[in-house]
Image: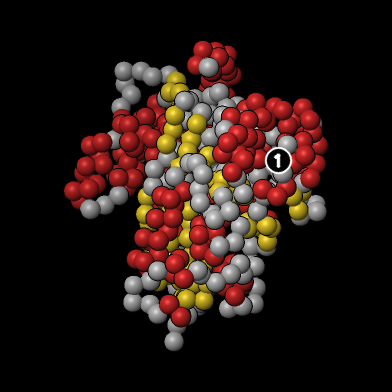
Amino acid sequence: MDKYLIAHDMGTSSDKASLFSTDGRLIKSYTVPYDVHFFHKNCAEQNPLDWWNAVCTATRKIVEGICPADVLGISFSSQMQACVIVDRQGNVLRPAMIWADLRAEEQARMLVGRVGGQRMYELNGHRASASYSIEKLMWIRDNEPELYGRTYKMLLAKDYIICRLTGRFVTDYSEASGTDAFDLRRMEWSQEVLEAAGIEAEKMPELHASTDVIGQLLPEAAGSSYSYIKKALCREEEQRAEQEGGSVYDILNRLVMHSPAGAKGLVFLPYMLGERSPRWNPDTSGSFLGIKMEHEKCDYIRAVLEGVAMNLDLILKAHREHAHVGELVLTGGGAKGDVVAQILSDVLGVTLHRLDHVETATSVAAAVIAGVGVGAFRDFSVIHQFVKPELAFHPNMDNRVTYDRQKALFEEGYRCLRAYYELESDLGR
């Protein structure tokens, strides 16, 4: 009789639940969306109860017809750098501040002043930033002291779900590494950072390896840019996709094919939520540059995709200063379209391999972790049974000159707008 593993991929916009057999077959997958609430320019929150409801709904869908006893384990991957505060019973005290929330700038500066930027990097591999969890918890302490006083633990996104499922307040090492308060060498919470931050160590969750079995289900539990352009400019395409029963992104990908490489000179800076790597500037905002009468909807959509690719190219360039970067693997829902994959390959200048289960690749990893944790698999080498390369995308050298020009405009555009972003932020305070 088949045995199964359940994996949840809790992203910023939805939870994707996947049911795998232990021999590597994807049996079912189901996605439940939820909302992000953006306000006051740099605030981004989600209701953790929306995550919980999505996890419950998606799980019910994928286990229909499956005997519960045949499910060996449940594992989670999720968006990182959230800040969820709960009381001793695991009740949420306020909406979660997610990774895109950048209101804790003052707290980040305070942490740098007390610890030092270089020392922060030595301890946890990060610079101090408003995007990380400990700075968000500092903001709650400074601005919502009554709630902070009632806080028993700070959790991350998936940790809240695990708390609801098992009653335990835990996180794993990889998740902890995104809090800015984790000592990478000692594999424990950094007392130095916590003391500088003024955060009691008792408010941090218990640390575990990703493969540790956290517990049994409680009885009551057992029962960003491309998305924006879709919503803002593509209502007609959304309606058509609904009528045809397909995906709006498939329609947008076909539209992009009518625009040439370089989008007729149109440039997009994809900083809809400020920017972290490599700019580290929370004041930035999204910008189209070089708009002309000749530009059509297809050009705007292509410019958005190229802008995202060019920012990734800057990150890749930083990696290349320290290590060789060869071929890369492409995963995620955005990788489904051949047009998007080819744009990324052309801009990055590398061969990209798309996996056969491109949308569930993260869930595959979570499922394998669960399998190793419960002893279904000896080690992680079994991953090759679950995913395989499906298609390779090679850089089109005919587009190199065009993209070199666009990259120059992209970088100069940001340089010219830095003063504007700073002024916009100052006037908005």
Does the image show residue 236? yes
Quarter of the figure with residue 251: top left
- Tag 1 secondary structure: loop
Figure check: 161 above or below 428 = below
Figure check: 136 above or below 378 = above
Q: Residue 278 location, x and y as percent?
A: 63, 33
Q: Residue 305 location, x and y as percent?
A: 44, 37
Q: Residue at x 73, y 32 (%)?
A: 111
Does the image show residue 361? no
Mark 1: which amino acid? Answer: Ile
Q: Which residue is mark 1?
A: 199
Q: Residue at x 40, y 65 (%)?
A: 59
Q: Residue furthest bottom?
A: 1
Q: How many tags in the picture? A: 1
Q: Residue at x 53, y 24 (%)?
A: 284
Q: Residue 307 location, x and y as percent?
A: 48, 32
What colour scheme has been applied to the protein in the rendered image?
secondary structure
306 left or right, relative to 240: right
In the depicted view, which residue is nearer to us: 314 or 221?
221
Figure check: 95 above or below 262 = below
In the depicted view, which residue is nearer to us: 199 or 98?
199
Q: Residue at x 52, y 37 (%)?
A: 100
Q: Residue 182 location, x and y as percent?
A: 72, 47
